[in-house]
Amino acid sequence: MKIVVTGGAGFIGSHLAARLHEQGHEVAAIDCFHPYYPVERKERQFHALTGGRVPLARFDLLDGEATKRWFSQFRPDVVYHLAALPGVPYSLAHPLAYIDYDIKATVNVLAAAGEAGVAHVLFASSSSVYGDRGNVPLREEMADGRVVSPYAAAKYGAESFCHAYAHLYGYQMTIFRYFTVYGPWGRPDMAIGTFLRRLLAGEEIVVYGKGTARDYTYIDDIVEGMIAALHRSGGRSEVFNLGAGAPVTMEQLLAELRKHFPDLKIVHAPERKGDVKATWADITKAERAFGYKPKVAFAEGLARTVAWAREYER
Ligand code: NAD
């Protein structure tokens, strides 16, 4: 199949583009190299993972005309739309940027995909759309818009546009709600990435409030799930949790990290606004519709990530 991955030089996008290419698809990536985190890192991760075998179009999806032009030339069968500004803290400082990058750019992609006759659009949403629900398994139908950050509000809005455009153009729509993805080349602004960088530099790590519990999901499981969903069952426009299905508390994360860094030191800081205290994915729906079954246990995934960081994060 002809497949485009937007945000293809990002953490998840680079892994996904590389795997789709390995499987023999004709893959192209689009990325504007937004400086949310260092552009050189995006260049390195895209190159390291795809080995230069995936063509990359460097432009901003906020440019609706350029987006339409590119789609009408490449004419993909499938679009994985991952391009966005991620992350909660940045969204508190720059809420309007999320309306641009997470909503407007998404609408440009949805319209360009419709006009180019795309059959299936798969969109990267987030567990943050559930808001702060406490430590309970989250099922897809529980999202009701009561979110706690501008990032989550933008993702929730973008999901609605996805449903609307699937209806207007008749393509299949799959919305993934990821739950804290980690692994080699993991985003440097997320907890595990930040902790590893500081630990490797011999610095203490900062825990906000009592620390949050997260349904950490290993990157390979996410990628396999996203690809399996190409052949999913269900209706035209569906939402699926992609998590590990078991939350890891901050104490558990710190205990696992101590196995690799016995001298680990912690400093405490006040709780951060916009952070939900716990996430826990109910993954039954994805399991039924496309056989999603995460395989990498947290201790194993973290060990692989630490090994990668020792080589690349110095
Ligand atoms: P990332 O920042 O590494 O990747 C996103 C990429 O999109 C970046 O390389 C960026 O340059 C690109 N981009 C942003 N706006 C663009 C635009 N207008 N035009 C072209 N390119 C643009 O983030 P990631 O962690 O790989 O996340 C990928 C997607 O998954 C995002 O939509 C994110 O919100 C979502 N998500 C990620 C997680 C996670 O745990 N990593 C969790 C939930 C949801």
Image (cartoon, rainbow, N blue to C red):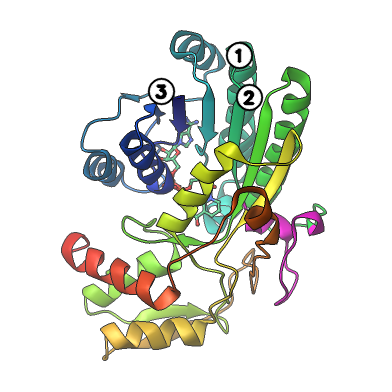
The residue located at (59%, 17%) in the rendering is 112
**Quarter of the image holding residue 27?**
top left
Q: Which mark is residue 149?
A: none
Does 140 lie within the magenta span?
yes
Q: For the residue with label 3, is its CB less than 8 Å from the closest atom of ligand 1?
A: yes
- Amino acid type at mark 3: Phe
Residue of label 1: 117
Q: Percent from the top left, x then y, of residue 257?
A: 35, 82
Can I make out residue 265 in this image? yes
Residue of label 3: 59
What's drawn in magenta, residue-wise? 126-142
- Amino acid type at mark 1: Gly
Q: Quadrant of the N terminus?
A: top left
In this rendering, the answer to whether 147 lies above or below 99 is below
Give the CA separation, mark 1 to mark 3. 21 Å
Residue of label 2: 110
